[in-house]
Amino acid sequence: MNLKWPKIVLFGDSQVQHSFGPNGFWGALLADRFQRVCDVIPRGFSGYTSRSCRIILPRIFYPENISNVEAFVIVLGTNDSSGKEDAPEYHVSLQEYAENLDAMINYLQVNVVVF
């Protein structure tokens, strides 16, 4: 018998990367709540923006390496909202931020079939 275990995927910036640590343990709480129901898989990248995550998402998640996803949580915006003058390498306009999220959601709907 081949058991297919459902998954909740957390994807995003440092809020996800540190979600199992002592200062941001929301991912651990989620995993504890859903233990014996599904796996919680964190894929967080400190310092990344929606622009950089839009590029790496299809390289990390594709039909051949991920299945049985019940929920896909995208947590981005902390770095994107950096001031244009203060941190131009991180700043992403609100319009581009929305476009990046739309592109990621569309990719997941078409290629990973999470919804």
Image (cartoon, rainbow, N blue to C red):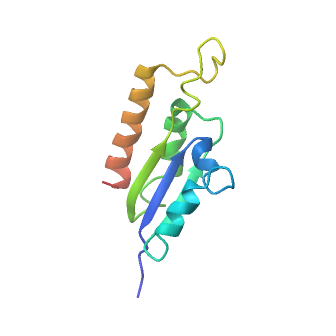
- Is residue 27 placed above or below 44 in the rendered structure? below
Residue reaching furthest right? 22
Give coordinates of residue 6: x percent, y percent. 41, 69
Residue drawn at point x = 46 percent, y = 44 percent: 74
Give coordinates of residue 70: x percent, y percent. 37, 61
Residue reaching furthest bottom? 1
Give coordinates of residue 18: x percent, y percent. 64, 50
Can you say which quadrant of the picture contains the N terminus?
A: bottom left
Residue drawn at point x = 58 percent, y = 41 percent: 13
Of residues 69 and 67, the one drawn nearer to the viewer in this rendering: 69
Res. 63 image quadrant? bottom left
Of residues 59 and 7, the one drawn nearer to the viewer in this rendering: 7
Res. 5 image quadrant? bottom left
Residue drawn at point x = 67 percent, y = 55 percent: 21
- Is residue 22 placed above or below 57 in the rendered structure? below
Give coordinates of residue 107: x percent, y percent. 38, 43
Of residues 89 and 22, the one drawn nearer to the viewer in this rendering: 22
Res. 104 image quadrant? top left
- Is residue 109 placed above or below 96 in the rendered structure? below
Can you say which quadrant of the picture contains the C terminus?
A: bottom left
Q: How many marks?
A: 0
Residue drawn at point x = 50 percent, y = 52 percent: 10
